[in-house]
Amino acid sequence: GAVVSQHPSRVICKSGTSVKIECRSLDFQATTMFWYRQFPKQSLMLMATSNEGSKATYEQGVEKDKFLINHASLTLSTLTVTSAHPEDSSFYICSAPLSFGSGYTFGSGTRLTVV
Amino acid sequence: AQSVAQPEDQVNVAEGNPLTVKCTYSVSGNPYLFWYVQYPNRGLQFLLKYITGDNLVKGSYGFEAEFNKSQTSFHLKKPSALVSDSALYFCAVRDMTSGGYNKLIFGAGTRLAVHP
C-alpha cells in the first residue's frame, strides 16, 4: 500500500536552532501533504497544507516564518522548524491523501524536543 | 461548520467484552468518515472508512463501525476486546468544503483501555 516515510522519528535540539522534518511518499506521488501537530494526549491539529510546486497554505494562528514548508517534488515534503523554542516541542505528523475516496496515509511521526 | 465529536475521553473495558467508541459528526452533504488508531509515539493507522454503501463497515483487526445518518453517528465497535487494542482512537471526517484533496477534521480522540 501507499506509504509515507517520515524522518527523523525523534530529534532533540537546542533552543535557537532549526530542525527539518522530511516526509517521502515511497510508492506513489503525493501532490498534497498535510502537516499536523499533536500535543500530549490531544488531537491532531492541522498546521498547513503543502502542494507540490506552490506555496503552502497555513492554518490560522500558525506562523509561516517559523514553520517553513517546502514541497519541491511529488515525493518529498519538508517542514522546517526555525529558531526552535521549548514550546515548539511536540509530535509532528505528515499525511498524504490517496486517490479520491481511498483515504489518507500517515507518516510515523516526529517527536521534537527543544532544550 | 464541519466537526467531529468524541464524547468520551476514555473508555475502559474488560478483555473479552465488547467495546464501543462513540463518534458523532456534523457536515454538509454526505460524509466521508474514518477511524484511525494511534499507539504511543507512532503515526496513525487506518482502521476503516465509510464513503457510501452498507451502513455497517468492517475494518482491520476485527473492528467495525456503523454509520447512522439519522443520528449523525459513526461508532466504532468490536465484539471482543483485546488488551492489545489499548490505544488512542480518532474519528475523522473529510472536510468537503475545501475541494479536491480535502483535509481531515479529527475528533479529540478517545483513549481505550482494555484490562485483563
Image: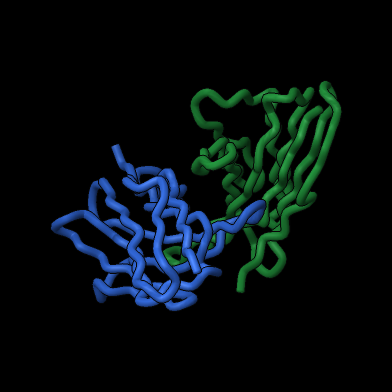
Chain colours: A green, B blue
Which residue is most to the left? B70
Q: Is residue A65 above or below residue B71?
A: above
Query: Split into 4 quadrants, where in the image is the N terminus of chain A?
Result: bottom right
Q: In which quarter of the image is residue A51?
A: top right
Image coordinates of residue B56 in percent, x first then y, are: 28, 74
Q: Quadrant of residue A36?
A: top right
Q: Which of these two is toward me, A12 or B111? A: B111
Which residue is most to the front? B116
Is B66 placed left or right of B39 in the picture?
left
The residue at 82%/23% (across/down) is A15
The residue at 76%/51% (across/down) is A9
Is B30 placed left or right of B95 in the picture?
left
Q: Is residue A65 above or below residue B11?
A: above
Image coordinates of residue B89 in percent, x first then y, are: 46, 56
Image coordinates of residue B68 in percent, x first then y, are: 20, 62
The residue at 55%/57% (across/down) is B38
Q: How many labels does the image show?
A: 0
Image coordinates of residue B11 in percent, x first then y, are: 39, 55
The residue at 63%/54% (across/down) is B40
Is B41 placed left or right of B18 in the picture?
right
Q: Which of these two is toward me, A50 or B91? A: B91
Q: Quadrant of residue A18?
A: top right
Query: Split into 4 quadrants, where in the image is the C terminus of chain A?
Result: top right
